């Protein structure tokens, strides 16, 4: 009977092993894939304020690498479950063979576990440090590559290199500790196991003292099963250390997937077709972080459909913030923005943003053709004529034609590099091609020379006849074309009127105007 039991035990062990491998492989890859897609989904829908706070290099690593680590974790977990199941059956077997000895064995096993505990804790700490170091390194490399021109211009290469070298060196030490510890755990388990078996033999001799015949008949199969159990315990411990070292990755993923702090915007339900009357702000206040000073303070404002509004003011006065709120990149902390009297938050965001063209301070170009960069974001097919017409209006057609492959030239990251003014003109063409109801230019012509800027302004005015235009600018020539000027300071509108009115007054704008006049002389 004992022999049959042993054969059963061995078959069981291997069968669960195969099952665990199969299940582990399927489950872990599936979970990893789902984690990756959910992280992407969360990142795509997280509000702009979340992304601006995050370090890019870190986020990339967490989104792309860490699910793989969780995949390992799940695989080990499934296997541990199988190992534990087998061990439990084996322990049951031991009970049948001799319950007294089994109790002794369990007591010894518990002692071994306690001895190993400190060890595993140290490993957990090292693993967390290692993950943090990895993320820091990723972030530093990403930042160094992004700022390579600045770094070279200020000859800071050696400094960056030494920071990275130090990070790499620290990672190496921590990683060496982890590898060493998680490998030696196996040996330690072996030694502990052997000592436990010795102790067990001693107890057995004591227990069966009165009956020597019993000793051999019972002890032999018992010992056989025990010697099968020890490698299992070793494996369980090894896998446990692996899990412990993968756990911090799960924590970091959880941080990203944890929804609360991302300022998700709740999408509205009403479709937006066109602007009928105008935009309005009602007592709008906004701060970038809880407790920070308000970037916009108690703002009341009406912007009529079809008007051209220029926003001026010192840098940091809240101009871009105002525009970002109008585009619903953030929701106001207090007050409300209304579009044709309807709260902006009630509008379906996608349908609203589709009707807005925006040209920001910095122009992002994709690694793609000029044509596709201009047509970016349009749903349907676009004809070449439409693209060329938009480029002409934005004063970009001539320089595009002069490029080696015209509209088919690859630009952007790793493509043909364009000047700041050229990039801005492409961005303006992109925004015009959308045929927007509302066009927002946030220092969109700041890199252009005076004459090009003038030409584009005429085109924009022409284009904007029945559209609503918001222009943030520093040059008087730009401001002069507006129906209305808003002067901002510390998140408030301090002057509001037509350019002529403001110039005639004695406020900030009149002062600015005088300064401009002087600089022209
Ligand atoms: P402007 O466009 O007029 O130069 P902004 O609207 O960009 O000014 O900034 C208004 C204020 O908000 C500034 O004090 C600036 O420091 C702050 N601010 C702007 N962007 C952020 C941000 N992403 N996080 C925190 N504070 C910000
Ligand atoms: Mg700005």
Image: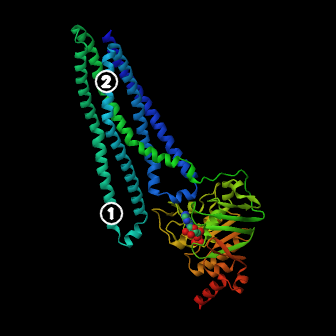
Query: Which residue is labeled 1 in the image?
Result: 161
Relative vertical location of residue 382 with respect to residue 152 in this rendering, above or below: above
- The disc, 2 or 1, on the residue closer to the chain's N-terminal end is 1
Q: Mark 2: which secondary structure? A: helix
Q: Nearer the viewer, mark 2 or mark 1?
A: 2
Which one is in front, 215 or 297?
Answer: 215
Relative vertical location of residue 286 with respect to residue 109 in this rendering, above or below: below
**Callout 2 crowding tier (Cα within 10 Å): few <14, some 14–19, many ≥20:** some
**Quarter of the image where one finds residue 98:** top left
Which one is in front, 494 or 346?
Answer: 494
Residue 128, given in percent of the width and then of the height, sits at 38, 47
**Callout 1 crowding tier (Cα within 10 Å): few <14, some 14–19, many ≥20:** few
Which one is in front, 200 or 31?
Answer: 200
Kindly report the distance in space between the C-alpha atoms of the residues bearing marks 2 and 1. Answer: 51 Å
Q: Which quadrant is the C terminus positioned in?
A: bottom right
Residue 418, given in percent of the width and then of the height, sits at 50, 69
Which one is in front, 284 or 429?
Answer: 284
> What residue is drawn where x is 71% and y is 73%?
308
**Quarter of the image where one finds residue 507:** bottom right
Left or right, 108 with respect to 407, comes to left
Decide: marks 2, 1 in contact (CB < 8 A)?
Answer: no
> What residue is drawn where x is 29% and y is 21%?
226
Disc marking residue 225: none
Residue 173, given in percent of the width and then of the height, sits at 29, 51
Q: Which quadrant is the N terminus positioned in?
A: top left
Colouring style: rainbow
Query: Which residue is labeled 2 in the image?
Result: 229
Q: Residue furthest bottom?
A: 521
Q: Is residue 208 visible?
A: yes
Q: Mark 1: which secondary structure? A: helix
**Quarter of the image where one finds residue 212:** top left
């Amino acid at each position: 009977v004992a022999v049959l039991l042993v054969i059963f035990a061995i078959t069981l062990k291997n069968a669960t092993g195969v099952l665990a491998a199969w299940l582990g492989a399927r489950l872990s890859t599936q979970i990893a894939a789902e984690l990756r897609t959910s992280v992407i989904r969360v990142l795509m829908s997280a509000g702009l304020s979340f992304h601006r706070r995050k370090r890019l290099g870190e986020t990339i690593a967490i989104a792309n690498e860490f699910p793989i680590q969780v995949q390992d974790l799940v695989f080990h977990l499934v296997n541990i479950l199988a190992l534990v199941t087998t061990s439990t059956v084996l322990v049951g077997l031991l009970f049948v063979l001799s319950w007294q000895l089994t109790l002794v064995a369990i007591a010894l096993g518990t002692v071994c576990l306690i001895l190993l505990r400190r060890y595993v804790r140290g490993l957990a700490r090292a693993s967390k440090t290692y993950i943090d170091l990895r993320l820091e390194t990723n972030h530093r490399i990403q930042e160094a590559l992004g700022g390579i021109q600045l770094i070279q211009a200020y000859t800071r290469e050696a400094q960056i290199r030494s920071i990275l070298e130090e990070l790499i060196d620290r990672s190496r030490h921590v990683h060496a500790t982890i590898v060493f510890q998680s490998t030696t755990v196996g040996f330690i388990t072996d030694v502990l196991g052997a000592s436990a078996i010795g102790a067990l033999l001693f107890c057995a001799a004591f227990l069966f003292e009165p009956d020597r015949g019993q000793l051999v008949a019972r002890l032999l199969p018992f010992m056989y099963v025990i010697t099968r159990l020890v490698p299992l315990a070793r494996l369980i411990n090894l896998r446990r250390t692996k899990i412990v070292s993968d756990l911090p990755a799960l924590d970091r993923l959880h941080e990203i997937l944890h929804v609360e702090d991302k300022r998700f915007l709740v999408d509205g339900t009403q479709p937006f077709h066109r602007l009928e009357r105008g935009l309005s702000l009602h007592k709008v206040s906004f701060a970038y972080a809880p407790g920070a000073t308000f970037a916009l303070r108690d703002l009341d404002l009406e912007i009529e459909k079809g008007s051209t509004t220029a926003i001026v003011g010192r840098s940091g006065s809240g101009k871009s913030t105002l525009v970002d709120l109008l585009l619903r990149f953030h929701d106001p902390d207090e007050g409300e923005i209304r579009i044709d009297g309807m709260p902006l938050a009630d509008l379906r965001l996608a349908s609203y943003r589709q009707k807005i063209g925006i040209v920001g301070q910095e122009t992002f170009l994709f690694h793609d053709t000029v044509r596709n960069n201009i047509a970016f974001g349009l749903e349907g097919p676009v004809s070449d004529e439409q693209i060329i017409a938009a480029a002409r209006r934005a004063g970009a057609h001539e320089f595009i034609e002069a490029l080696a492959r015209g509209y088919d030239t690859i630009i952007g990251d790793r493509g043909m590099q364009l000047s700041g003014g050229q990039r801005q003109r492409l961005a303006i063409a992109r925004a015009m091609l959308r045929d927007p109801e509302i066009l927002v230019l946030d220092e969109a012509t700041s890199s252009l020379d005076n004459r090009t800027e003038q030409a584009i302004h005429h085109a924009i005015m022409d284009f904007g006849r029945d559209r609503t235009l918001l222009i943030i600018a520093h040059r008087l020539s730009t401001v002069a074309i507006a129906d209305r000027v808003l002067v901002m300071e510390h998140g408030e509108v301090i002057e509001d009127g037509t350019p002529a009115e403001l110039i005639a007054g004695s406020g900030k704008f009149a002062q600015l105007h005088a300064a401009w006049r002087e600089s022209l002389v």
